[in-house]
Each structure stands twice: as C-alpha cells, then as structure tokens.
Image (cartoon, grey):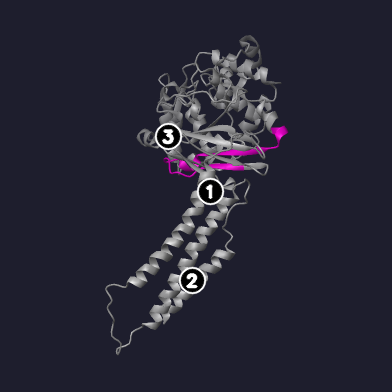
C-alpha cells in the first residue's frame, strides 16, 4: 500500500510543480508563438501518458498485491491489447511530431522580403555580417580567412565590398521586420539560440544553415551557444539589440564596410606624437610601460585593440569602478582626446614605434610548467605564442609585464573590470579568469606568458 501512495503522490506533486513552477518560458519577443504551442502540445501528450501510466501502475500494484490464494495467469499474446496500445501510441507520437514538422517547415522558410544577417561562430565568439546597399552578401572561403579578413570574404567579389562587418559585441536589428539568419561555423559545432525569440539552430562546419524570425519588442536579448563547443563554451555569448527603425538606421550608418576594413587608417603620425607627449610620463617615450606608474607596455599592441580600449575608457565602459584606480586615471586621460580623429592619430603614432626590449620580472615562486598547462585554455583566443587574434578580438599579451597581467586577471575576478554590459569581451574574461582558482595559479600563468616574448629577459623577485 505504501508504494501505491508514493506513486499517486509523485503524480500529484509533478502536476502541482508543473502548474505553479516559476521556471517556465521567457517572455515571448518574436512571431514564434507557434513554437510555444508545439512545446505545449508535446507536454500535454507526454504529461497525459505520464499520469495514465503511473496511475495504472498504482492500480495494478494495489489490485494485484500479494495474495497467497491467487494464481498468476500467463498470456504470451494478446492481439487486442497490442493493437490498442499500438493505435494509442501512434496517435500520441503523431500528435507530437505533426505540429513540430509543420512549424519547422515555416521556421526554415524565410519570407522573400526578409533582411539577411550572417552569423559566424567560432570558439568562443560570435561575428556578424550584413549586406550593403546591393542587398547581397559576398562570397566567402575558408582559405581567405586571416587577421585582416576574419570572415574570409572574397575581395574579388564585388558583392562583398559593401558588406557591413559588425565589429562590436552587439548586433542590432529593426523591430517588426522579418530577419533571416544565415549561420556558419569556422571550427566546430555551435548552436545559435535566443530564448526570447524561440529560435535555435546548429552551426555546422562546412555548410550553411538558416532560420528566420520577426522581433516584436524592442530591447536587449542575449545570444547563447547551446552546443557544447569546448572548455570555454559557457563564455560564448553576445547580444541582439532590437531597435526602432530610426534607431536602427542611425546604428547602421556607423558600421564599416569590408572595403573600408581593408583600408589602412590614415592617421597623422606627427599629430599623434604631440598628443602622446601627455602619455609619456606613465607609459614611457617608447610605450614601454612603467610598473611604478601602474602603466602597461603599449608599443606593439594592435591598432584595433588600442582603439577599442580608448573608446571604452571614453564611454566609461572601462575605468568606472572605484577600486580600479589606474583605470580611473586612464579614463580621465582618454577624455583629453577630443574626437575619433585624435584617437586615430595617437594610435597611428603608437603603431609606428619599435617594440622595445623590456625586462620583465615574475614571482620567485611561479611554476612555469604549471603556467604552461593553465595557458592552454587562454591560447584558443590569444594564440599559442600570445600573439593575439583579431578574429577573436583577443589582444597580444606576449611582451607584457607579468605584474600587469596578474593585476588584470585579479581585476576580472573581483569584478573591477569586465562587468559593464557593453564589455562583452571583458565579461568573457571574467568567466575565463574563474578557471584560475588562487593567486598561485595567477602567478604561474602570468609568469609563463612573460616567457612567450623572445625579446624579454627573465629575472626573479619576491
């Protein structure tokens, strides 16, 4: 009897949990309410089977409980029962599959008037491309992928010259416009998912997949990878911003085309040198950095990374935390650059500097062998030699001081850096830094990174 009561209570408890549970669908923000309906149909079918089977089990346990005067009846076949079960099972399976197949057919058949967005996944980063005024995406090839062409766009294809490359951490789309997402992967299986839009699709290396949706609410929505794609799978996040038409057109006008990305920035090195004079007190005349001033080495860093960091400081994405004194100082200094032209000029000067040989000291207790092992995860983005990776938005870290690398890792772990919602790559680094469980691990990996620079000399200090 106790087993019967437990089974009945299990059924009742499951039903109560289903109807009062706070864990349910996120609020719908697209046209795909039919996906919710399909899921609900599957839940009703499986729920009905769950209740029926378990209540029948409870009935059988109760009715045919042990009785020493009862004898078992053996029936090797029961055609009537088997036919009935086959029919009921077939109806249940059809009730679950038919709506899903119907909705799937709609899900992958985008309307002709849909705007097109290409989504490219790689460990562990999302990239986006939009067609330009010609409304066509240019052809791509894996062999063409390099630092200056991370999506592998064919430069000889005229249709690709005006393609817009989204270099920020966010993709903007207009509200109430059907959007076709063309998906491809550069390495392994990924999965593009936005829960509020009810969209989810695999990215398969060597082929293209697609889906479409129409966002019905403005707002900010997180993009997730829902396919286990490697050790840092959980950091593969981005955002979609759904704008009004006016806001979307304003954002679109600020994006650079593929042709513009290939052109070298035309900064004035002499003007940049004069602007940089205010920076030498901390960073040194050759950009070699200064530990006393908490200033890292900046000579040799890529122009795109320097541009992003200066822009972040100016926009208060970085350097606003009260515990980040050096960051606050840099935020004030970045504010002295009046416009984008000034940023371009000073960066043009910095990239013209020769990378100086600097002496880098690491902790006496650092274990380089353990640091090398820990760095394997970092190498996916920053490169095996710490050379950086433009396609992953990962800066060069070889040639940097161990004390600075340690300070930044600690800042990520403590939330001094990377918490701003617009700092996607900082948020990724916060998650990645959690893999280093103590200060010794930070010392080990920082010390190992310092060995990746062929121009450095190592010494020790306590």
Q: Mark 2 points at which residue?
A: 11
Q: Residue furthest top?
A: 270
Q: Quadrant of the N terminus?
A: bottom left
Which is nearer the N-term, disc 2 or disc 3? Answer: 2
Please state which of residues 403 and 250 is positioned toward the viewer in this rendering.
Answer: 250
Please state which of residues 458 and 160 is positioned toward the viewer in this rendering.
Answer: 160
Q: In this view, does 138 lie above or below 213?
A: above
Magenta segment = 221-247
Give the residue at x 69% y 25%.
335
Q: Name the residue under label 3.
A: 445
Q: Position of residue 117 (x, y in %)?
A: 57, 32
225 drawn magenta: yes
Q: Where is residue 422 in the image (x, y as percent from the top left)?
A: 62, 36
Q: Is mark 3 on a helix, strand or loop?
A: helix
Q: Where is residue 115 in the image (x, y as percent from the top left)?
A: 60, 33
Q: Mark 1 points at which residue?
A: 103
156 drawn magenta: no
């Amino acid at each position: 009897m106790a087993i019967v009561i437990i089974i009945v209570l299990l059924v009742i408890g499951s039903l109560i949990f289903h109807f009062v549970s706070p864990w349910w669908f996120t609020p719908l923000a697209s046209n795909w309410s039919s996906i919710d309906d399909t899921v609900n149909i599957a839940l009703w079918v499986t729920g009905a089977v769950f209740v029926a089977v378990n209540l029948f089990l409870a009935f059988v346990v109760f009715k045919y409980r042990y009785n020493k005067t009862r004898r078992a009846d053996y029936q090797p076949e029961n055609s009537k029962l088997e036919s009935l079960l086959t029919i009921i099972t077939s109806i249940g399976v059809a009730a679950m599959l038919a709506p899903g197949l119907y909705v799937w057919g709609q899900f992958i058949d985008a309307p002709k008037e849909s705007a097109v967005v290409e989504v490219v996944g790689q460990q562990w980063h999302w990239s986006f491309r939009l067609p330009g005024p010609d409304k066509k995406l240019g052809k791509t090839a894996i062999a063409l992928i390099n630092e200056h062409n991370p999506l592998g766009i064919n430069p000889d294809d005229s249709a690709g010259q005006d393609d817009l490359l989204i270099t920020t951490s966010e993709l903007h789309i207009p509200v109430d416009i059907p959007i076709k997402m063309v998906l491809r992967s550069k390495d392994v299986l990924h999965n593009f998912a936005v829960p509020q839009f009810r969209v989810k699709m695999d990215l398969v290396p060597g082929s293209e997949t697609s889906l479409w949706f129409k966002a019905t609410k403005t707002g900010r929505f997180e993009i997730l990878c829902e396919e286990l794609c490697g050790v840092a799978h959980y950091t593969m996040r981005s955002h979609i911003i759904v704008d009004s038409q006016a806001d979307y057109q304003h954002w679109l006008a600020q994006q650079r085309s593929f042709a513009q990305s290939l052109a070298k920035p035309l900064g004035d090195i002499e003007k940049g040198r004069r602007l940089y004079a205010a920076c030498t007190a901390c960073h040194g005349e050759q950009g070699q950095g200064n530990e006393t001033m908490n200033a890292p080495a900046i000579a040799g860093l890529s122009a795109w990374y320097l541009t992003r960091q200066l822009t972040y400081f100016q926009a208060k994405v970085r350097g606003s935390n009260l515990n980040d004194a050096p960051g606050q100082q840099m935020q004030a200094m970045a504010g002295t650059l009046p416009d984008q032209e000034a940023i371009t000029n000073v960066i043009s000067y910095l990239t013209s500097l020769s990378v100086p040989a600097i002496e880098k000291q690491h902790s006496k207790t650092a274990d380089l062998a353990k640091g090398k092992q820990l760095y394997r995860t970092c190498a996916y983005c920053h490169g095996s030699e710490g050379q950086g990776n433009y396609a992953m938005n990962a800066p060069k870290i070889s040639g940097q001081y161990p004390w600075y690398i340690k300070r930044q890792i600690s800042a990520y772990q403590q939330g001094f850096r990377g918490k701003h919602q617009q700092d996607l790559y900082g948020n990724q680094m916060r998650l990645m830094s959690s893999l280093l469980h103590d200060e010794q691990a930070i010392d080990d990996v920082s010390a190992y990174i310092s060995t990746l620079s062929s121009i450095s000399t190592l010494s020790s200090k306590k």
